[in-house]
Amino acid sequence: MQAIVLAGGLGTRLKSVVQDLPKPMAPINGKPFLAFVLEYLKKQGITEIVLSVSYKYELIQECFKDEFNGMKIYYNIEKELLGTGGAIKDALKFIQNQAYVLNGDTIFDIDLKKLVLNDSRICIALKQMQNFDRYGTVNVDSQGIVTFFEEKVFKKQGLINGGIYLLKKDIFDEFDLEKKFSFEEFLQVNYKTLKIQTQIFDDYFIDIGIPQDYQKLISYLNGA
């Protein structure tokens, strides 16, 4: 049970509330946001974690060392920003066969075991959303296979990419890719070839990328 956590974010949009910290280290009730992500992974039965880190990664290493609640931690350090795709591709050297991939600045409280791989090399966790314009939309067929990715526009209702994936180590093997690339764009361009499986969830979801949602999470955890 291995997981890759993308924790290299600069937190540019959070600068007004979080100064000089990697985004996953944003403090929530006295502990870094990343600790909540790792606690979630522990509950899900994960035994090994690869933290893909970049900006001020030393702060993350100092905080979490090489173990958290019995889970082994490996660090994949990006000397230059590789984009989400490049970061995942580089971190796969730590992976044996398949791994869950999560964002270090998002909580999506799903049951990871519901993500399954049948004839595909990737399964995406989708979130049902109402009245949104901050996220693109994912369209699927009756079998849950991705048929189209839509750009960000206002939607009264739709499915968004929740940023949690189960993928095989060889997902990139057939593709000629740059060292630096966006995983989201990779999926959008190659969804037909990849035959992307999905699973729809309605669990709690929050991305702390903007100050409003950062404050929302603090209120949520305080029972407000």
Image: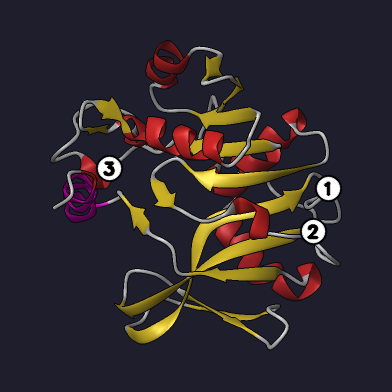
Element on which disc 2 rests: loop
For the stretch drawn in magenta, the main secondary structure is helix
According to the picture, the residue beneath numbered tag 1 turns out to be 170
The answer to whether 119 appears left or right of 209 in the picture is right
Mark 2 / mark 3, whichever is N-terminal: 3
| Quadrant housing residue 116 | bottom right
Q: Residue at x 19, y 39 (%)?
A: 15
2 or 1: mark nearer the eye: 2
Q: How is the image coloured?
A: secondary structure
Q: Position of residue 28 (x, y in %)?
A: 24, 34
Mark 2 / mark 1, whichever is N-terminal: 2
Label 2 sits on what residue type? Arg
Count of labels shown?
A: 3
According to the picture, the residue beneath numbered tag 3 turns out to be 12
Q: Residue at x 75, y 76 (%)?
A: 192
Using the image, determine if residue 161 lies above or below residue 32.
below
Distance of label 3 from label 1 (alpha carbons): 32 Å
- Magenta span of residues: 210-220
Label 3 sits on what residue type? Thr
The answer to whether 220 appears left or right of 67 in the picture is left
Element on which disc 3 rests: helix
- In this view, the residue in front, 119 or 110, is 110
Residue 217 shows in this picture: yes
Q: Position of residue 128 (x, y in %)?
A: 44, 75
Q: Is residue 8 magenta?
A: no
Q: Position of residue 32 (x, y in %)?
A: 31, 29
According to the picture, the residue beneath numbered tag 2 turns out to be 121
